[in-house]
Amino acid sequence: MTSNAITQIAASINAGQLHHAEQLCRTALLEFPQDESLLLLLAMSLHSQERLHEAMSIYAQLTQLFPMSSEHWNNYGTALAAAGAQEDARQAYSKAAQMDPRNPMPRIHLGLLLIQRHEYLAARGALLDAFELDRESPLARIHAARACCLCQDFEGARDLLGPWRNWLPLNDDTLQLELAQVLTLQDDIPGAADLLEDLLARRPGHLDARLLLASIYERFNRLTDAEELVLSVVRMGSGATDAQRKEALHILAELALRKKDPVGARQLLEQCGPHGDDDFVHYFDLGAACDRQSETDAAMTALREAHRRQAHEFQIASPDFFEPGAQALPTDAPRIPAEQYKHWPKLIAPEARDSPVFIVGFPRSGTTLLEQMLDAHPGLQSMDENPFFNRLVLMLRRQNPRILDDLGVLQQFDCDELRKRYCAMVAERISRRRGAQLVDKNPLNMLWLPMIHRLFPEARFILALRHPCDVILSCYMQNFRSSILVAACSSLERLAHAYVQAMTTWLEDVNIFQPSVMVSRYEDLVTDFPQQATRITEFLQLGDASPMLEFDRHARNKAYIATPSYSQVIEPVNRKGLGRWHRYRRQFEPILPILEPMLRHWGYDSGMASIPPAG
């Protein structure tokens, strides 16, 4: 077979003349029935015509004729995967990788197949192997970062995608959309928006990009822009698939909730139904719509289903968190006994003014409201939630796990270096404003007081406090992305135990380390806002509290707020969140004995006169 004929057939395929290419191949194969190039081109033309089973037969024939070819095994695996024969495809990709260990593509295809099978840890391994084979490849990095996010390895994903802006233009719309999707998973929403806006400027009819950008605009509180994008997809003649139309209805339901139309949101959600068995977001939205209609039984039914599906999805990557008997709130935070703390050497450390201000508290206790208030003050600067101390402890554990048994072994040099690492991580997230004191808001930093105290012993803390039952209800209604919180929220009972565990840990550590702490009660904050703002400024020695009183205007001027409360903190202070749990009194009766010690400690009423104390 001449090279000119092969070139002619390949040109026909590239030009979309698939039937013509097929005929040329079949004619030539009459004379050269086992010609490798002709068989491959025939399979490609059939595959492009969506005649999958015919193409698969040719790919299989090529693997038999040329069993040492990684390319043929890889192509065969792709056809098998498209036909739904996932296990056979997995074996074909593995064979392709075996035939050419230095070729990253079979591992990339294997990793993507494993993601479809929800085998996230195995997918992460395969895709990281592909990345190691070609560390400069945006394709390998993006797919590996996606697998890392699905495994809750957001640190690994961030490292892989660090240079993503240097890859532009990608010249691959599908890959650019996936990069935007992965950036949303790791909460780089502004970066995802840039990619999608660029993609739509070139391809206005890209419906998946329109839908994802609509969701992002909702996160930016650009509701009109979001609605316009979605409506363009649902209009007749848009060419949307059933899946795209269903996603559009889901987004319209979210927008209806934002516009305080729970009836319309519920109708849309019940009309479209969930995307599939793993669609827990649908049920969280449905629960929110029912809650706003004061239909508590329907809300709880939807939320139980949301948590059931979410737990099934998240336990794939973090099975230990969901084991029977697992700790209610899994944590790696080191605990330090009082006797051990007495022997810690006193080291040179930053003064209070040079240390971060830490806002802590159980999630949904009002920490975001406090953060936005403080960020509105010109003397302070906040940032998105980041697990900095988790990352520092992970680094210490890799160096020497025994360090965590007694943080007192950390000497002056060690603590100085850890503070430098902390400051470097902060600098990766925000551009520090000269003269402004940092505000580090991460609710579950309340579990990390020993580590924080070792590095910043003079730091001031604001503990956000709210009625535990309102906190539990708000958490149960929240679609968290952290495996730890997903596990903790899997039932009201476990969530109550998690709350007590976190608060008990905090109170014990405060008793040992005696940090400078101000307790900010949500109920006081929303009923006497000016006075509470003054309390905060006095505690932090800031002077004028007036900038904090307009925090909502300051928040609205932000392009993006990376917190589940992004839609609430742009509103002025209100009392809508007070006492919500009373509507769910019947569902809360079984967990009130669990919460009773904390209700009693903080002076909150539970109405438990007829309920025996916890044992």
Image (cartoon, rainbow, N blue to C red):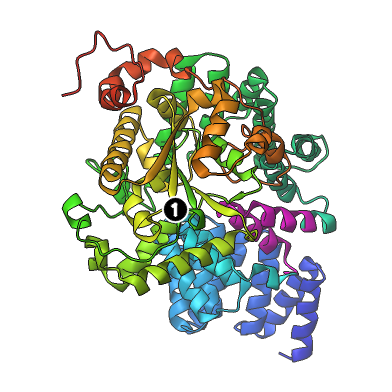
Residue under the point 20% across and 50% down: 338
Q: Quadrant of residue 192?
A: bottom right
Residue 472 coordinates in the image, percent (x, y): 40, 28
Say above or below: 415 vs 484: below
Residue under the point 68% across and 57% down: 191
Image quadrant where one finds the N terminus: bottom right
**Relative depth, front residue between 598 and 213:** 598
**Relative depth, front residue between 263 and 351:** 351
Image quadrant where one finds the C terminus: top left
Residue under the point 23% across and 12% down: 611
Going by the numbered disc 1, the residue's amino acid type is His
Q: What element carries label 1?
A: loop
Mark yes or no: residue 450 visible.
yes
Label 1: which residue? 118
* Helix, strand or loop: magenta stretch: helix
View extreme (bottom): residue: 2
**Relative depth, front residue between 510 and 448:** 510
| Label 1: how many Cα within 10 Å (few below 14, some 14–19, many 20+) | some
Residue 430 coordinates in the image, percent (x, y): 61, 59
Q: Quadrant of residue 160?
A: bottom right
Mark yes or no: residue 92 visible.
no
Residue 537 in the figure: left or right of residue 486: right
Range covered by the magenta-colored residues: 169-198
Residue under the point 39% across and 23% down: 469
Say above or below: 234 vs 261: below
Residue 568 coordinates in the image, percent (x, y): 62, 31
